[in-house]
Image (cartoon, rainbow, N blue to C red):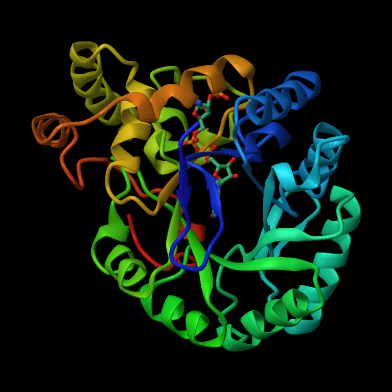
Amino acid sequence: MQTRTLGSTGPTVSAVGLGAMSMSGAYGPADRGESIATVRAALDAGVTLVDTGDFYGMGHNELLLSEALRGRDRDSYLLSVKFGQQVGPGMRFSGQDCRPASVRNFLSYSLTRLGVDHVDIYRPARLDRSVPIEDTIGAIKEMIDAGYVRYVGLSEVDAETVRRAHAVHPVADLQIEYSLLSRAVEADVLPTLQELGIGLTAYGVLGRGLLSGNWVPGRADDPRNHSPRFSAENASHNLALVDALRRVADAKGCTVAQLAIAWVAAQDPSIVALVGARTRQRLAEALPALDVKLSADDLEEIEAAVPKGAARGDRYPAAFMSSLGVGN
Ligand SMILES: NC(=O)c1ccc[n+]([C@@H]2O[C@H](COP(=O)([O-])OP(=O)(O)OC[C@H]3O[C@@H](n4cnc5c(N)ncnc54)[C@H](OP(=O)(O)O)[C@@H]3O)[C@@H](O)[C@H]2O)c1
C-alpha cells in the first residue's frame, strides 16, 4: 500500500482511505457483516485512514466501526470524524452546530461510540455560518491540547475559511468532493492548500457510484435518486461520460473505477483518495488503483473523455448546495 502525507503538518496515511458512510444506509441498505468484514479487510491490506461522521446513520456508523476495529492496535489506523451536522428524526437535515461547547459535547459522544480515547482528525462537516470558524477550530485545538484529538481537519469550505482556520491551528487536511465530475476545487481551493501545506482528502472520487461502472438507475431504495446527477434527466448524459472513460480504461487494462481513483491521485501528491466501498469486492477493486500510472497522454485522453464541467446536474440537491464552500 502506497502512503501519502497530508500536507506539511499532517499524518502519513495510506494513499487510499476507506470512507464508511455507505455502510450506514447512505446509498440504500448495507449488510452489517459484510461492512465489518470490509473494514477489517481494508486494514489487513494496509489502509490506515478510516473516515466517518457522527451523523452517519445517527451514530450507527461509529458503533459499526467500533466493532470492526475492536482488538486492532490503536496506532495501526487513523480515524477521521466529522461533526456538527444537525439531523432530526426521519433523516431531516437542519443545519450545523459548531459552537465550542457543542464541539466538546459531540466529541465525547463520538469517543464513547467509537470506543477509543482519541480521534485522529476531527473536522466540522460543514461551516456553521453563525459561529466564527476561529471559535470552532479553537475548541478543537483545546481538545488537541487535552489529548482527545490529534489533528484539525476541515470539510467542504472555501479557500478563505481554510486560511482563517489555519491561522488558529495548522490544518492537516481539507476533505472535499473531487473527481472527474466535480472539479470546483481546482480554481482556488487546491492552490490555497498547496500554498499553505495542507493535504486534501478527496471524497466522491467515484462520483458516488456514477464513475464506478456499476450504478444502474431505477433502484427504489437508493437515496441517490434525489441527487441531481442521478436524476432521470441527467443520468443518461452522465453515464455517457462514463462510457467514454471506460474506453480509456479498457485501453489501459484497468477498470473505470480504478482510472477515476488514479486520476484524482495524480492531481497532487498531497491528495488522499477516500473510497466508499461497503463490500470486500469493491474494496479489492479500488485498492490497486494507484498502481495505474497515468502519462501526460493518458491524462489528455481522460480530459477528452470527461472534460472539466461536463457533468450535468449539481453535485448535491438544491437545499444542500448553499452549505458548500465551492460549487460543482
Ligand atoms: N466531507 C463530506 O462532506 C463527505 C461527503 C460524502 C462522503 N464523504 C466521505 O467520503 C466517502 C466516500 O464517498 P462516497 O461513498 O459518497 O463516494 P464514492 O466513493 O465516490 O462512491 C461510492 C460508490 O462507488 C461504488 N464503489 C466503491 N468502490 C468501487 C469500486 N472499486 N468499483 C466500483 N464501484 C465502487 C460503491 O458501490 P456500492 O454501491 O456497490 O457500494 C458506491 O456506490 C464516504 O464514505 C464518506 O466517508 C465525505
User: Does the rendering let one see residue 106?
Assistant: yes
Left or right of 295 on screen, residue 242: right
Q: In which quarter of the view is residue 84 placed?
A: bottom right
Where residue 27 appears, as percent x and y from the top left, is: 60, 32
Left or right: where 176 falls relative to 283: left
Q: How many marks?
A: 0
Q: Is 128 above or below relative to 12?
A: below
Instruction: Estimate the x, y position of residue 237 in percent, counting from the top left.
Output: 25, 29
Q: Residue at x 37, y 75 (%)?
A: 196
| Residue at figure coordinates x 28%, y 51% from the top left | 183
The foreground one among 291 and 312 is 291
| Residue at left offset 8%, top offset 31% | 297
Residue drawn at x 33%, y 33% as measured from the top left: 262
**Percent x, y for residue 47?**
59, 35
Q: Examine the rendered structure and indicate whether residue 184 appears above or below residue 225.
A: below
**Considering the image in quadrants, where does the C terminus appear?**
bottom left
When the figure is inspected, residue 105 is found, relative to residue 284, above or below; the finding is below
